[in-house]
Image: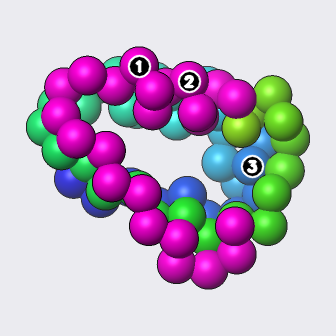
Amino acid sequence: MAIKIKGVIGWDVIGTYFADTISRLSGDIDIEIDSPGGYVTDGISIFNALKRYDKGKVNIHVVGEC
């Protein structure tokens, strides 16, 4: 499964929505990041969701700004 994080964190990508999406997945996931940054609290939500993910391997690729 590939998930794209594109845009401003907390504006274009909401941390709680991302965490909810990740919690519903299983298997390996590929994360593509193209983001200039954003809100720290949403970034922490995203980080924690990825750290908790134990249903497969998480691969992260920076494809633009990061």
Residue drawn at x 41%, y 19% is 52
User: Cβ–Cβ below 8 Å for labels 1 and 2?
Assistant: yes
Tell me the tag on residue 9.
3
Residue 27 placement (x, y as % from top left): 13, 37
Say whether residue 54 is left or right of residue 45.
left
Rendered image quadrant of residue 47: top right
Say whether residue 57 is left or right of residue 38.
left
Residue position marked by numbered label 1 in the rendering: 52
Which of marks 3 and 1 precedes in the sequence?
A: 3
Which of marks 3 and 2 precedes in the sequence?
A: 3
Q: As shown in the figure, which amino acid type bears the numbered disc 1?
A: Arg
Q: As shown in the figure, which amino acid type bears the numbered disc 2?
A: Asn
Secondary structure beneath dot 3 equals loop
Q: In the displayed image of the protein, which residue is found farthest to the bottom? A: 64
Residue position marked by numbered label 2 in the rendering: 48
Q: As shown in the figure, which amino acid type bears the numbered disc 3?
A: Ile
For the residue pair 61 and 3, the one nearer the viewer reads as 61
Total labels drawn = 3
Q: In the displayed image of the protein, which residue is found farthest to the right? A: 39
Secondary structure beneath dot 2 equals helix
Rendered image quadrant of residue 33: bottom right
Secondary structure beneath dot 1 equals helix
